[in-house]
Amino acid sequence: MINLKNIEQAAAVYALIAASVFAFLSFYGTDGETYLFPRIIAVVLALMSVSLLIANWSSKNDNRSDSGYFAEIWPGMVVGLVFLLVMEDLGFYVSSFFAFLAILLLYGVRPITDIKALIMKSSAALAFMAILYFLFWNGLNVRTPTGILF
Amino acid sequence: MDFINYFGNVFTPYHLMLLLGGTTAGLMLGALPGLSPTMAVALIIPFTFHMQPDSGLILLGAMYTATVAGGAISAILVNVPGAPANIATALDGHEMARQGRASEALHFCFFSSFVGGIFGILILIFFTPPLAELALKFGPTELFWIAILGITVIGTIGSKSVLKGLMAGLFGLAISTIGDNPMLGEQRFVYSDHLESGIHIVAALIGLFALPQILTLLEECRKGNRGSMYALSQSRWYQSMNYNLRRAKALTIGSFVGAIVGVIPGAGGQIAGLVAYDQVKKTSDNPLNFGQGEPDGIIAAESANNAMVGPSLVPLLTLSIPGSPTAAVLLGGLLIHGLFPGPDLFTMHGEVIWTFIDSLIVAQVFMLVIGLFLSRHSGWIMKVPPNYMAASILVLAVFGTYSIQSSYSDVLIMMVLGVIMYFASKLGFSPAPVVLGIILGPIAEDNFLQGKLIGEAGDGMFNYFFSGTINLVLILATVGSIAYSVYAGHKMKKRATA
């Protein structure tokens, strides 16, 4: 029986799923010449996934770390997602300022309602953006999305 | 001895100022994730329009050498390689930083870069004609086997399991096939407009390294690990230099591998660093220490990626074939100044070219001095709280990715790959083989398809791919590499259980 709490078996199972999806996409309804190289990779990848599974079949230790880490990272992932969604509309520097500040506040020691910490973190975010702006936008002429502001 | 005759041209106040400015800017730009040497040189080309050809090339050369070394700063301090060439440096460099030895790791990085860089330039000066002949002998099959050899090297890099390392490399190869077929031009796996241009290597590099690092830092915040991330002790540069010079084997392997890979058109510093790292690990008495903060890992990787710089200019200057992506941008810089590479370049524009080559030697000295100064003062990065570090890396990652080709799709791809890599790393997969797979994918596929066409039109595919001295040597090296990886894996397992 496959034990998904075993890191090696879980890795083999997920890799086999990924290899199977890749093989399906490479072989199903595609041109043999165009997809020749991906097909070769898909077959080798699937064989290796099976080898990994067989090599670790007898390993039954629950050595996979607790999946509780998702609870710790999801606020950061939401910030990243919102950052991506608004970047083109708000502009890179404005949206970056808010994303920077949001991470400082959400993962800071002091509570979000602490005004002193809010001012300090806003200043840090503003300073970081100002350095980026003057160095790259003005100095090196590197262009980023401007959006409605700059 | 033409190169000695023109040495004096480098030591004018104006040229020394350009070298100082180019090296300092190169080290800083190189340390930013996403601002690869290629992009840094491309960014600076417009500034050279109004300069004399020799002055413009001096600035471009200084930027090239310094950005390759500068990429190691972020690789060591925050585990995000500034450029693909510094992937191997992060493997042991960041581990040393975690152990409070960041300053020592940076010293090793700059000393090794200096030694490798000087070696590479000497190769450029003395071996340009024979190396150009060797580079000419590399056809599609030789380049295909070079890529396959690189893929077999993947197995032992950054992964505890050879099989997982090879699988991660194959995932990289699979990702590299998204986009146009290199021969037929037809699109593959393009299920969204964002994938139309394929996966850009720098976007993938940033995503695969930076995003997992950001998420790990956020984890640390929630677990209560705040304030100074790692302890930091200052080490004396002359002690590091002594140690560095005693690691002759790692320096030699790194420098030779870098020079050989550099001269092969299209290979680039990323392959040089990883191959050198792998070879030093395989020949080490303590292979288990690699990945745990082994200085030899940094020494080999950094000497290799800087030793690649000089030789990568050999095919560029003699045959107009760039030895690396950055050399390709430099080719643009040469053409802007009316210098057309080829056999006549050294006779018609000898003064400009030899001044440029001589300036690369002086740039190495500047890089060492400024690098050591920066390593003494870059320790503050280690004291930045993890939430500030995560926020900074996020903004820089998005900025660096967007600025590659002003593409929002690149940012999206970078984020998606990064999140997948974060979860894959929890299963024991490492990002380095994936990146190497993405780099080698186009080289392998393009040359495989070319070789297939040529072979089918001649004596058959098998004959074409399995004949010729260089092909046979490369095939033997590939088989030997796989066999040794399996053997070394077993040996390491035995040692670990003993």
Image (spheres, grey):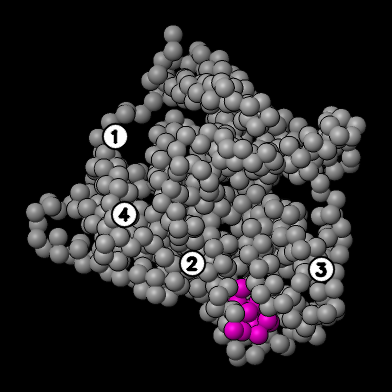
Q: Please, what is the three-letter code of the amino acid marked with disc 1?
A: Phe
- Residue A118 visible in image: yes
Residue B62 located left or right of residue B482: left
Does B330 appear above or below A58?
Answer: below
Q: Is residue B442 left or right of residue A94?
A: right
Number of the front mark, 3 or 2: 3
Tag shown at residue B29: 2
**Marks 4 and 2: same chain?**
no
Q: Secondary structure at mark 3?
A: loop
Badge 1 marks a residue whose secondary structure is helix
The quadrant of the image that shows the C terminus of chain A is: bottom left
**Residue ID for mark 1:** A70
Q: In the visual, does B236 lie left or right of A72? A: right
Q: Position of residue B255 (x, y in %)?
A: 71, 58
The residue segment tinted magenta is: B50-60
Q: CA distance from mark 1 to mark 2?
A: 33 Å
Mark whose residue sits in front, 4 or 2 = 4
